[in-house]
Image (cartoon, rainbow, N blue to C red):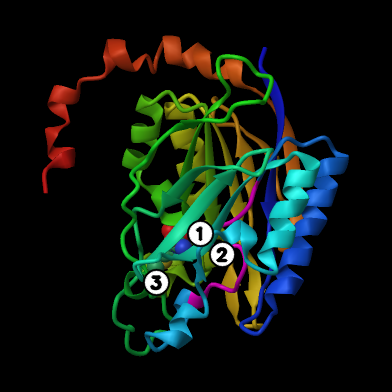
Amino acid sequence: TRIIRVASAQVGAIGKDTSPLVVVNRLIKMLDQAHEEGVKLVNFPELAFSTFFARFLIPYGEELDKWFLKGDVRKIEPYDKFFAKAKEYGISISIGYAELTDEGDHYNTSIFVDQDGNIVNKYRKTHLPGDKEPVPNAPHQHLEKRYFLPGNTGFKAFRWPGTGTGHGGPIVGQLICNDRRWCESWRVLGLQGTELVLIGYNTPTASKWLDGVDPGKAGIDSDKLAKHQNDICLMYNTYSNCCFSICSARCGIDDGKYGMISGSTIIDPNGIIIAKAESEGDELIWADIDLDQCYGSRDRVFNFGKHRRPEMYGLIVEQ
Ligand code: CDT
């Protein structure tokens, strides 16, 4: 067995004017709890340090760049306190933030920082949802295509060494929010033998306005429908790629009016949810996962080498 204790840190409402230090202290509180529980890895949400600013129309330039972090995020105040605490506890983390590069490019990014404080992987979000131009008359906007460049890192699996689980460490991959809805993202990680997929999300409850789905037709309200769609993509893709997944929500009602779904999960290779957040706010959930469990279906029904027919899938990669 290769058992390791992992956690998902769900982060509740953050207002437009909430100070970064207040957010950092909330995240540290969850690190404290993780440390008490003997957790080795904590997964945090997409854009975890601020409110989901892509819902606002913000002028390009200085005003927009205030939402972004430039340079080594581990060394920027007050975020440095969060990274120092994780290192002190020897806890590895995956966390999302808005990245401004030295060249002036903007990305929706996630980093994996190991137990010694080293950045082992940087992933930039591939599938950017929403719009470049504001949608007239929508109650609020989703302007990721306006503020971020499409990620250029690709879905790169990496080793997380020093965990004591043998085999050179777990094989890990990162995805960000909308990426989780696309089976292609998962399969590219699956083909690299990924054992653990880490995901953060900001999913508005008002999906009728944002993605064209009419919850009325599904007979349930938009919050329930969005949670259902979140669960099914995670359960199926975790199962069909023979891995574990940890998924963390930025949720709650920001500024009293912008609702986002909760429902953070840890899921096993059978597609079973083994831990799930129950609140609409900050909450740490954890589970002991045995990475050897990835290899049952990997050797049988999802033995990629034996059963896949890539020669029949060409349409998927045609433009
Ligand atoms: N942040 C993010 O990617 N959210 C999307 C909602 C898009 S609705 C225009 C998601 O897939 O959850």
Crowd band around label 2 with a 10 angstrom C-alpha radius: few (<14), some (14–19), many (20+): some
Say which amino acid is labelled 1: Ala
Q: Is residue 53 above or below residue 43?
A: below
**Foreground residue, 294 or 235?**
294
Seen from this angle, which residue lies furthest right? 36
Q: Is mark 3 within 8 Å of ligand 1?
A: yes
Q: Could you tell me residue 63's position as x and y percent?
A: 47, 87
Determine which residue is flagged by label 1.
226
Kindly identify which numbered label has been placed on residue 210: 3
Q: Residues within 10 Å of mark 1 (few under 14, many from 20)?
A: many
Identified at 53% across, 19% down, the residue is: 294
What type of secondary structure mainly makes up the magenta span? Answer: loop
- Which dot, 2 or 3, sits closer to the camera? 3
Residue 274, image x and y in percent?
Answer: 68, 34
Q: Residue at x 51, y 77 (%)?
A: 53
225 up-or-down from 244: above or below: below
Residue 228 seen from this side = no
**Residue 49 sits inside the magenta stretch:** yes
**What is the CA distance from the residue labelled 2 to the residue labelled 3?**
13 Å
Question: Given contact means CB atoms under 8 Å apart, are the residues at marks 3 and 1 in contact?
Answer: no
Q: Tell me where the magenta segment starts and ends, as one range.
A: 43-53
Whether the residues at callouts 2 and 1 have beta carbons within 8 Å, the answer is: yes
Does the magenta portion include 196?
no
Label for residue 223?
A: 2
Q: Is mark 1 within 8 Å of ligand 1?
A: yes
Q: Circle 3 sits in a helix, a strand or a loop, which is it?
A: helix
Front in this rendered view, residue 270 or 254: 254
CA separation in Å, label 3 and label 1: 11 Å
Q: Amino acid at mark 3?
A: Leu
